């Protein structure tokens, strides 16, 4: 549980610091892309934020796990219980 909290805190800090900025090499190396996707959805960021993360990280020779990011994003959206928003986001994510 403690490790999960550490990872979640890292993801929150990472997304909070990168919503409108480029990712650094150390941020790109962060390996819990599922948590980052979940946090992006929780912050109501567009799923397309992964495209910017990919562009930033490729410049540092790191390829983010897009599938894990999307899975985390979808999971967070589905867990909100907002069926109308869920349908719209999931349709775009396909």
Image (cartoon, grey):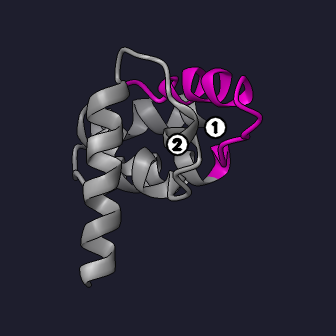
Q: Which residue is mark 2?
A: 26
Q: Which residue is mark 1?
A: 94
In this rendered view, identify the residue nearer to me: 45 or 26: 26
Q: Which structural element holds mark 2?
A: helix
Residue located at (47% from left, 30% from top): 47
Q: Quadrant of residue 16?
A: top left
| Number of on-image labels | 2
Residue located at (72% from left, 23% from top): 59
Q: Which structural element holds mark 1?
A: loop
Farthest residue in the bottom direction?
1
- Res 45 visible: no
Task: Provide residue 75's location: percent of width, then percent of height.
Answer: 41, 56
Q: Quadrant of the C terminus?
A: top right
> Against 53, is 90 above or below?
below
In this rendered view, identify the residue nearer to me: 93 or 9: 9
The span shown in magenta is 46-67
Task: Provide residue 44's location: percent of width, then percent of height.
Answer: 27, 30
Residue 3 shown left or right of residue 48 in the figure: left
Farthest residue in the top direction?
20
* Residue 14 part of the magenta segment: no
Task: Provide residue 71's location: percent of width, then percent of height.
Answer: 54, 54
Task: Provide residue 28's location: percent of width, then percent of height.
Answer: 57, 40
Residue located at (66% from left, 21% from top): 55
Q: Quadrant of residue 37?
A: top left
In primary-sequence order, the first of circles 2 and 1 is 2
**How much space separates mark 2 and mark 1, taking CA atoms?**
29 Å
Classify 10 Å Cα crowding around label 2: few (below 14), some (14-19), many (20 and above): few
- Identify the mark at residue 28; answer none if there is no mark: none
């Amino acid at each position: 549980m403690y490790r999960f909290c550490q990872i979640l805190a890292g993801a929150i800090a990472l997304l909070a610091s990168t919503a409108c900025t480029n990712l650094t090499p150390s941020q790109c190396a962060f390996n819990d892309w599922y948590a980052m996707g979940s946090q992006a959805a929780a912050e109501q960021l567009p799923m397309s934020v992964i495209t910017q993360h990919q562009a930033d990280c490729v410049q540092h020779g790191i390829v983010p796990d897009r599938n894990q990011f999307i899975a985390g994003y979808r999971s967070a959206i589905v867990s909100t219980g907002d069926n109308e928003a869920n349908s719209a986001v999931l349709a775009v994510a396909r």
